[in-house]
Amino acid sequence: MSKKRVELPVLAAENAAAPCCPPLTAGELSVPDSERMAAMFKALADPVRLRLFSRVASHPGREACVCDIADVGVSQPTVSHHLKKLREAGLLTSERRGTWVYYAVAPSVLAAMSAMLDLPADR
Amino acid sequence: MSKKRVELPVLAAENAAAPCCPPLTAGELSVPDSERMAAMFKALADPVRLRLFSRVASHPGREACVCDIADVGVSQPTVSHHLKKLREAGLLTSERRGTWVYYAVAPSVLAAMSAMLDLPADR
DNA sequence: CGTCTATGTTGACAGATGTCGATATCGAGT
DNA sequence: ACTCGATATCGACATCTGTCAACATAGACG
């Protein structure tokens, strides 16, 4: 029996990949599912992006001004580029407030990731 | 803007990337942690590898013969290449038994990934 | 030994990705 | 309107990555 998963009201990033994540160990992934999940993993598959994401995720309210997290050892255009990737992947959202831009962890991301792991019974 | 970096009791680090994963939302990742985690995500950041991994993970005993999972739509060398990547990333182990080679999910991987998510209280 | 089957390795190539400098945009004050 | 600080976009570049065909290796079995 195939997957009859109820699609959560996952964020709809512009064109990207957040709606996903059947348990990794539950059965063979379909091609579309594997592509969506791979897109999410790809967004996290860079040390700089991972540090940017963790900085946002560990800020109060799970949101942070770019100015507070941009010091990661690469140039400002590169930071902007990585944040854009995270946003396009549906992991972060961005909002402008006056002079500054705030990035926040997209609400359903953590739930989606934990659903993906859904550890089976034998352990 | 100094950052207190409380190094959590990280799992014993080998050479590969599997032993890792402080909670993503608990605080800023250190550079080494971010590199280890990025290596793990990178291994999963490909649809073909994700399908190979899920096929192994969903087999009985979380192990499978290459011959049982190789039908993913790419050539045999490409399958071998992807399995090598997953092994080098510490996600799978391989063992030869006579004619066939069996890949299995590395024991600590699922625990490490769930530790990484460790959802905080405020949801 | 020779051959068959299963899997890994090599070499080559197109395309994707991370990075930067230069430049553009967008608000806030002056 | 002008300037300034904060982010985003653009263009260019070197490197990394996924893919395949061809070849190599390793057991099994005669």
Image (cartoon, coloured by chain):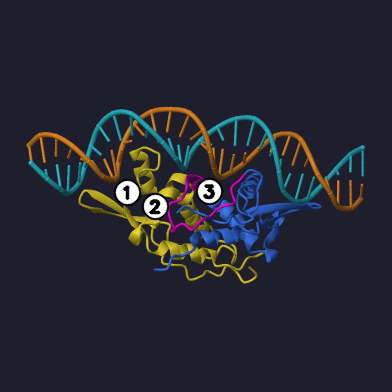
Chain colours: A blue, B yellow, C orange, D cyan
Q: Nearer the viewer, mark 3 or mark 1?
A: 1
- Label 3: which residue? A42
Residue type at tag 1? Asp
**How far is mark 3 from mark 2, CA to CA?**
20 Å
Q: Residue at x 56, y 49 (%)?
A: A43
- Label 2: which residue? B55
Quadrant of the rendered image containing residue C13:
top left
Which residues fall within the magenta stretch? A16-41
Q: Nearer the viewer, residue A43 or A110?
A: A110
Q: Residues within 10 Å of mark 3 (few under 14, many from 20)?
A: many
Residue B8 visible from this viewpoint: yes
The chain that hosts pointer 1 is B
Image quadrant containing the C terminus of chain A: bottom left
Mark on residue B68? Answer: 1
Tell me residue D5's x, y (percent).
Answer: 78, 50
Residue type at tag 2? Arg
Q: Residue at x 49, y 57 (%)?
A: B37
Q: Is A19 part of what is drawn in magenta?
A: yes
Regarding mark 1 in the picture, which secondary structure is present there? helix
Q: Nearer the viewer, mark 3 or mark 2?
A: 2
Q: Reading the chain from its start, which is encountered first: label 2 or label 1? A: 2
Q: Residue at x 60, y 58 (%)?
A: A109
Quadrant of the rendered image containing residue A122:
bottom left
2 and 1 marks in contact (CB < 8 Å)? yes
Is residue B97 left or right of B57 when viewed as pictured? left
Q: Is residue A62 above or below residue A78?
A: below
The chain that hosts pointer 3 is A
Regarding mark 3 in the picture, which secondary structure is present there? helix
Residue B30 visible from this viewpoint: no
Tell me residue C27's x, y (percent).
Answer: 84, 49
Mark on residue A49? Answer: none
Is residue C5 left or right of B107 when viewed as pictured? left
